[in-house]
Image (tube, grey):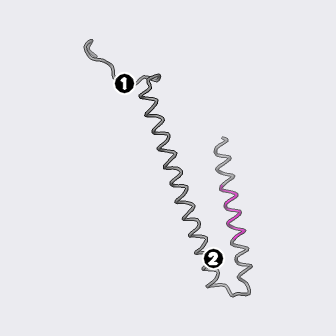
Amino acid sequence: MEEDEVDQTPQPGDSAAEGQGEMGRIFRKAIFFILIAVAALSTLGLFLSLNQIVDIWVTDRYAPLARAALYSFLMAASINIIRFYLIGKKA
């Protein structure tokens, strides 16, 4: 680098570099929450579709048993996903 040129690279203590890092962090959090909302809506749609499948394919006599099995499976899957997420955060 010549003596007349000035180094314009941001340094660790530079406020402009910290501002860009903060904006990136906020952007990543916003995208994360949008994806969580999409996943929640998709899960609700799947839940409602599975209930309709139970209504169509299972007779009225066994519908409560099929729903109980479905709800138990969904609850166990949710608990395992939450445990995996929380354990993943601690590690």
**Residue 65: quadrant of the picture:** bottom right
Apparent side of residue 9 relative to residue 62 in the rendered image (left or right): left
Residue depicted at x 64% and y 80%: 54
Please report the bounds of the magenta region as a residue range: 71-81
Type of the residue with mark 1: Thr
> For numbered disc 2, what is the local secondary structure?
helix
> For numbered disc 1, what is the local secondary structure?
loop
Res 9 label: 1
Residue depicted at x 42% and y 22%: 11
User: Which residue carries the number 2 mark?
Assistant: 51
Apparent side of residue 18 relative to residue 83 in the rendered image (left or right): left
* Horizontal and vertical percent position of residue 26: 49, 41
| 19 in relation to 29, above or below | above
| Label 2 vs 1, first from the N-terminus | 1
* Horizontal and vertical percent position of residue 73: 69, 67
In the rendered structure, does residue 83 fall within the stretch colored magenta?
A: no
Q: Nearer the viewer, residue 39 or 23?
A: 23
Question: What quarter of the picture does the C terminus occupy?
Answer: top right
Q: Nearer the viewer, residue 19 or 8?
A: 19
Residue depicted at x 70% and y 82%: 63
In the rendered structure, does residue 74 fall within the stretch colored magenta?
A: yes
Total numbered labels placed on residues in the image: 2
| 85 in relation to 54, above or below | above
* Horizontal and vertical percent position of residue 9: 36, 24
* Horizontal and vertical percent position of residue 84: 66, 51
